[in-house]
Image: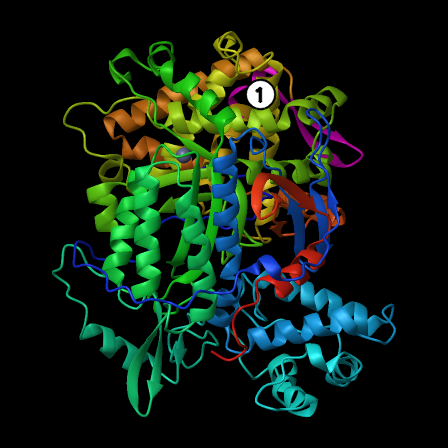
């Protein structure tokens, strides 16, 4: 995944974290009792906003609290799908939401208890709802909802409530006890006694995932992946099981809690009949409904394998599911559903439950195939030296999806790119799916534009006008060119090693520079208009404006004072913009203007800038083709590492008053079936207005686990 905006701080999942094993025996299904469906549950009425008419603006910004902004995304293309695909998406979306409780319990053993208590207060508190304490509780609840627990989603530290223990106890006592998670005949006193230290004692469960070696990583982490097990015990447990020579290793521990019970280590497996069974029964119920309307045999195959895996808990069955899933490449509707990423486990064994339902983005697919079909034209017409051009080039097929619903660990904070499965041997033998989440990125882009961040760094009205008209399109085309044409272009001279060998630690910054320059060079080519990809070259000018102001200024907001550039993408962006600024200085190609004490970089000659980009591209390709380490190093070190400290300080000061949230997450679109006597006649997409109300509706409809598991 490349080229993400500096302001969109969304997690990116890149695979290769766990290993799994393959081939194998039949699963041993065990029958599960038929779960209650959610059909009969009373639904909290959600206020929704209608889908906008084409060309109408869509309200993406939904909520802002603490360090978080909550956005909405649209689901273009859904309404036009045939009914069976809509039903399929709806059933998969229900399966994606049905496992909501699992990630909460995985993150920390008291999370569900806290969440239900907060929901009870918000639903029934009889006191003053305008009081500072109540408003602080509401904000705390939002933070907890956003993080799927009481620990910060990013720092993993326990979040401090903005109200004290006495205020909390008073609010709980003024709420409906019937809604509180009172267990085993316990009363409100017992609940408050338990929750007091959980919420207010900074020494209790201070961090979810402790990666600070020197301490016992498990005993010092609050995560619920282990119970009473030390790091040494867990490591010994798996050392005895893992076969280092297995070319198709099983992903040991991926779907269980490791617990010490009566002095013995036991894996409590997450499956039907095992731990988390009530939620998984619901997930499977909806997957079975999905199976009835599967689009084709390939999709049927992975749905069946996934269901068998949830029933058996057998990790070899999990591999079968993954292998079947990567083979399903033609379906319009797709889903990820399972225990997947292992970042939440200090030892990297256990998978956080997550789900994602998507449809293929047909618009993006058209864009990308138009580029891929012309890959040879782009290669032939590039400014590369003749010997560096590929005689026969194939564009890289990038895939873009439209998210319909996300659940578990993938929400409200979402990745913007996904590359699965994680098992290296499956990727090698069977391939993988790599996708970008188009509608999520679009929404994030729109919120960025509305935040005023870019306006702050644009001097001229023409530039602002272009940005607000073409910002999103120019961004997508820039990314498409980078991925489809950029990385595929050029060839290495015979006898020269791979960039990893020749350019070493500079290889990835230089490769991103190269792919960026290919994109920049073609963004101002009339061919793009001719192919119908952009209405005019103003779209390309928008890309130029953005890359210059971002590379020289905006991206610096992500650094702390005194830091230099480390990350490959940040290095390459400054390298390109800084090099072009310097080389074009004599001809005033990019002018540095100071107005009211503020610095701006204004492009004065777009054609000349394009020629400069072409010149630098030719040189960077030469460096790659010849493996010229010294020249590569000089470029990166001269233009891509050092930060202009005064300019950095200025950027930080200008960004501060904009109050831009470091983290963005999403309200999920809701799929609502239109039914007549139990038959689904249509499924419509609705866009909820309020984050808190969506969370409360989940509490009511998708809360299947007890508070202790
Ligand atoms: Zn790239």
Percent across and percent down for residue 593 are: 71, 27
Residue 592 visible at all? no
Q: Is residue 164 above or below residue 598?
A: below
Residue 310 is left or right of residue 237, and the answer is: right
The residue that disc 1 covers is 585
Q: Is residue 393 above or below residue 555?
A: above
Camera-nearest residue between 587 and 418: 418
Residue 31 visible at all? yes
- Residue displayed at 55% across by 70% down: 157
Query: Where on the image, by quarter, is ligand 1?
Result: top left
Q: What's the colour scheme?
A: rainbow
Q: Is residue 142 above or below residue 87?
A: below
Tally the numbered discs.
1
Q: Quadrant of residue 497?
A: top left
Camera-nearest residue between 40 and 82: 40
Q: Quadrant of residue 76?
A: top right
- Residue displayed at 43% across by 16% down: 370
Percent across and percent down for residue 543 are: 57, 24
- Residue displayed at 33% across by 31% down: 631
Magenta segment: does it hold 597? yes
Q: Considering the numbered disc 1 on the image, is that residue within a helix, a strand or a loop? A: helix
Magenta segment: does it hold 134? no
Count neighbours of disc 1 (C-alpha within 10 A) and say few if under 14, some if 14 to 19, many if 20 or more. few
Residue 399 is left or right of residue 694, and the answer is: left
The residue range painted magenta reads 582-602
Question: Farthest residue toward the front?
Answer: 677
Percent across and percent down for residue 657 are: 76, 48
Q: Is residue 170 above or below residue 245?
A: below
- Residue displayed at 55% across by 19% down: 584
The quarter of the picture where the N terminus appears is top left
Q: Quadrant of residue 204?
A: bottom right
Question: Farthest residue toward the left?
Answer: 245
């Amino acid at each position: 995944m490349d080229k993400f905006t500096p302001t969109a701080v969304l997690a990116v999942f890149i695979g290769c974290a766990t290993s799994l094993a393959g081939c194998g025996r039949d699963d041993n299904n065990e029958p599960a009792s038929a779960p209650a469906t959610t059909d009969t549950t009373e639904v909290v009425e959600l206020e929704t906003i209608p889908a906008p008419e084409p060309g109408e603006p869509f309200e993406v910004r939904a909520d802002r609290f603490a360090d978080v902004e909550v956005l909405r995304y649209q689901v273009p293309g859904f309404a036009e799908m045939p009914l069976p695909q809509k039903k399929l998406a709806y059933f998969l979306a229900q399966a994606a939401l049905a496992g909501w409780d699992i990630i909460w319990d995985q993150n920390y053993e008291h999370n569900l208890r806290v969440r239900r208590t907060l929901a009870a207060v918000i639903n029934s508190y009889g006191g003053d709802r305008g009081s500072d304490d109540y408003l602080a509780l509401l904000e705390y609840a939002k933070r907890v909802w956003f993080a799927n627990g009481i620990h910060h989603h990013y720092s993993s530290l326990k979040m401090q409530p903005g109200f004290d223990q006495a205020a909390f106890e008073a609010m709980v006592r003024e709420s409906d006890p019937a809604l509180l998670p009172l267990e085993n005949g316990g009363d409100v006193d017992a609940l408050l006694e338990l929750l007091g230290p959980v919420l207010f004692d900074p020494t209790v469960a201070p961090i979810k995932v402790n990666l600070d070696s020197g301490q016992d990583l498990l005993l010092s982490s609050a995560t619920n992946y282990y119970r009473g097990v030390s790091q040494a015990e867990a490591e010994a447990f798996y050392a005895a099981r893992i076969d280092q020579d297995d070319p198709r290793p099983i992903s040991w521990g991926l779907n269980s809690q490791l617990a010490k019970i009566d002095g013995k280590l036991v894996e409590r497996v997450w499956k039907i009949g095992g731990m988390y069974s009530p939620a998984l029964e619901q997930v499977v119920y909806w997957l079975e409904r999905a199976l009835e309307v599967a689009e084709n045999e390939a999709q049927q195959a992975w749905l069946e394998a996934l269901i068998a895996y949830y029933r058996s808990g057998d990790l070899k069955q999990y591999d079968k599911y993954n292998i079947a899933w990567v083979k399903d490449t033609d379906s319009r509707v797709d889903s990820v559903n399972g225990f997947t990423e292992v970042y939440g486990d200090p030892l990297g064994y256990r998978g956080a439950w997550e789900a994602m339902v998507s449809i293929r983005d047909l618009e993006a697919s058209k864009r990308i195939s138009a580029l891929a079909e012309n890959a040879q034209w782009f290669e032939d017409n590039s400014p590369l030296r003749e010997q560096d051009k590929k005689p026969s080039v194939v564009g890289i097929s990038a895939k873009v999806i439209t998210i319909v619903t996300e659940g578990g660990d993938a929400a409200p904070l979402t990745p913007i790119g996904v590359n699965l499965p994680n098992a290296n041997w499956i990727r090698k033998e069977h391939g993988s799916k790599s996708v970008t989440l188009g509608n999520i990125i679009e929404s994030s882009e729109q919120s960025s534009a509305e935040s005023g961040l870019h306006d702050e760094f644009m001097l001229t009205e023409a530039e602002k006008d272009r940005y607000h008209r073409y910002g999103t399109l120019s961004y997508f085309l820039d990314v498409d060119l980078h991925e489809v044409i950029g990385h595929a272009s050029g060839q290495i001279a015979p006898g020269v090693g791979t960039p990893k060998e020749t350019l070493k630690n500079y290889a990835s910054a230089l490769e991103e520079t190269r792919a960026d320059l290919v994109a920049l060079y073609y963004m101002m080519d009339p061919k793009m208009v001719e192919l119908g990809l952009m209405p005019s070259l103003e779209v390309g000018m928008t890309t130029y404006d953005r890359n210059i102001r971002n590379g020289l200024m905006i991206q610096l907001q992500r650094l702390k004072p005194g830091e230099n550039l480390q990350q490959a993408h940040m290095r390459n962006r400054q390298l390109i913009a800084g090099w072009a600024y310097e080389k074009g200085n004599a001809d005033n190609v990019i002018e540095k203007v100071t107005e009211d004490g503020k610095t701006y970089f204004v492009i004065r000659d777009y054609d000349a800038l394009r020629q400069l980009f072409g010149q630098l591209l030719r040189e960077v390709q030469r460096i790659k083709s010849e493996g010229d380490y010294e020249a590569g190093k000089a470029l990166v070190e001269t233009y891509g590492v050092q930060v202009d400290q005064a300019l950095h300080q200025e950027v930080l000061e200008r960004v501060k008053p904009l109050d831009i949230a470091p983290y963005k997450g999403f309200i999920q679109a809701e799929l609502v079936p239109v039914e007549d006597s139990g038959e689904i006649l249509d499924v419509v997409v609705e866009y909820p207005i309020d984050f808190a109300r969506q969370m409360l509706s989940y509490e009511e409809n998708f809360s299947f686990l007890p508070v202790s598991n």
